[in-house]
Amino acid sequence: MRLEAVLIEAEAYRPYGSLIMAARSDVAAKPANQGTAQKYNQLADFDNLRLEDASVNISVFRVSPHLDVSLDIRLLEKHPQSTQVFVPMNAHRYLVIVALGESEPDLSTLKAFVAKP
């Protein structure tokens, strides 16, 4: 299957999750840090659906860039009981590949998005 990546936009990504970004038209900024910053609240929901109490875990992955034009995807992860967030720390852009589905990915919903900081 060949999949073409498109620039990520909140409405197109909505079936898969929330796109967290500042300067959204539906979230008003509030001044912060003595007027030197703009604060955007409630940009996404964070769910913990585990039966036992689970603490927030923040992990950092250092990823080597993939330089080929094509990419062979062999695995899609699923996080049914928690929220996963990607925060690029120095990437100029990165690829987000998503699909809907219960026990297995529904390949008819497979999408590829290009995200930028």
Image (cartoon, grey):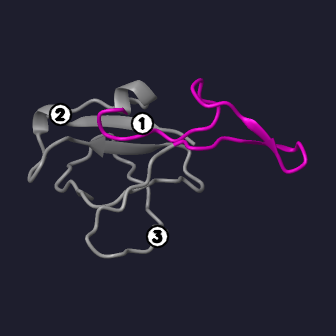
Badge 1 marks a residue whose secondary structure is: strand
Where is the N terminus found, in terms of image quarters?
top left
Q: CA distance from mark 2 to mark 1?
A: 16 Å
| Residue identified by numbered label 2 | 109
Q: Earlier in the sequence, mark 2 or mark 3?
A: 3
Q: Is residue 34 above or below residue 30?
A: below
* Percent position of residue 69, x then y: 33, 40
Q: Earlier in the sequence, mark 1 or mark 3?
A: 3
| Residue identified by numbered label 1 | 114
Q: Is residue 18 above or below residue 80?
A: above
Q: Earlier in the sequence, mark 2 or mark 1?
A: 2
The residue segment tinted magenta is: 14-43
Q: Nearer the viewer, mark 2 or mark 3?
A: 3
Side of 106 relative to 73 (left or right): left
Any part of residue 9 in sight: no
Quadrant in the rendering for residue 46: bottom left
Side of 72 relative to 55 (left or right): left
* Percent position of residue 102, x then y: 12, 49
Any part of residue 56 in sight: yes
**Label 3, residues with CA under 10 Å away: few <14, some 14-19, many ≥20:** few
| Residue identified by numbered label 3 | 56
